[in-house]
Amino acid sequence: MHSRYSRFLLKTLRCLRLFADSLLLCFGYKQCGRCTHWGRPGGGGDNGGGFTGHRSLYGHYRGGGKAGNPNGIGGHLRRGGGGGAFLLVQNKTVVDMIDWLKYYPLRLRDCKEGDSVKGPVFSKARPVKLNFRDNIIRLRAPRHRSTTGYSPIYTTGFKAASADQFQTRRGGFTENWKASTLLFRKLDYRCEWFGGRSGGVSISLSVLARVEGKEFKDSSFFYPGAFESAIANFLNTFYGVQKPGRAFTRRAPVNWQVQHHLPVFSCTFELWQRNLLSRIYFFFPLTDRHLGCISFDFTVSDEGPVAQAKELVSQIINSVQLELSPESQAQLDQAKQAMGELKLTEDFAPLKWPIKVEDIEQPLASGSFLSHSDNG
């Protein structure tokens, strides 16, 4: 039944496409032989006709037909050509409509191997500006688009005050961490022709801190050692203990990479579960007591969507900019004065899991990490 509906809709869309093309022909437009653009021939020198283009929209140059060539497309691929011409019209609207319907989030059938899956693209990402205690975080991220019922979070405007409202972070084996979520968006990946949702990626930007009475004493997150120990404690708290009756399949940090595009040190790494990529983290210090954390939660498993999602995540991370408040800048300068150059460990091996709950708050020792032979 579902396949019958799909075939009917596909035939209907093809008829609409032919109808739109026929209308353009009736109004004197012609389709370029080198691409899918439609244009009206313009009068060039010696009765030359041609298409005009506009590079700012479709990658073409403005120009008329080559002199003496009644059907020329001079200026379509290069600047020049005789005479003026008219505005290029592309059937882009029709293509966009078909794409919108092709990947509409309605499930009438199962997504099969070989079906194309489409998700958000970074070219349509919009600027985001967040403020935490006068520390300004800027990035670009696609708009929230999900059918799973999650609501977006964006602490800007009249919601800016909520950026400093912390709650104990649940889900760990201790309750020593608190978090304030500044941004949350969920992005769906959709299978073609009513195959429905095929997974997604969620973006969550939070500020993390230790709860009152559990702070790390005599330390600052602007010190590389304290920063790395805090990340290890965070991972141990939420992922390092085995739950009774369940197999343990988690590994982190995997693919640890030091980043250099912020005025403070920062790092990215992955969390794997059941031999699948589960989450990508991006950490950076905001104050001596607060960590910036952007997490990307993966619910896609097919190779194609995962590659698309990882590329999108990399582009979002590279777009992040940070302006420290005067207070945070003073704390950073103090750390530089005390230690000189501030550098993170280039090779941070995955933690040795599982551990016991009572070991979460213990200082890291040499036996806390997997050896390279175990890190497969």
Image (cartoon, rainbow, N blue to C red):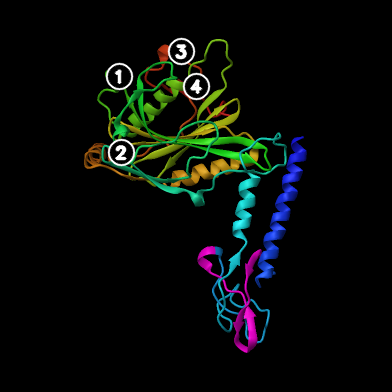
Residue 48 painted magenta: yes
The residue range painted magenta reads: 35-57
Q: Residues within 10 Å of mark 3 (few under 14, many from 20)?
A: few
Q: Secondary structure at mark 4?
A: loop
Q: Report how far apart the C-alphas of labels 2 and 4 lie in the structure.
A: 44 Å
- Mark 2 belongs to which amino acid? Phe
Q: Report how far apart the C-alphas of labels 4 and 3 lie in the structure.
A: 11 Å
The x and y percentages for residue 122 are 51, 48
> Disc 3 marks which residue?
356
Q: Residues within 10 Å of mark 2 (few under 14, many from 20)?
A: few
Q: Report how far apart the C-alphas of labels 1 and 3 lie in the structure.
A: 19 Å
> Disc 1 marks which residue?
214
Q: Secondary structure at mark 3?
A: loop
Q: Nearer the viewer, mark 2 or mark 4?
A: 2
Earlier sequence position, callout 2 versus callout 1: 2
Please name the residue shown 61% across and 74% down the image: 51
- Mark 3 belongs to which amino acid? Lys
Residue 258 painted magenta: no
Picture quarter with the C terminus = top right
Q: Report how far apart the C-alphas of labels 2 and 1 lie in the structure.
A: 31 Å
- Mark 4 belongs to which amino acid? Lys
Q: Nearer the viewer, mark 4 or mark 1?
A: 1
Q: Report how far apart the C-alphas of labels 4 and 1 lie in the structure.
A: 24 Å
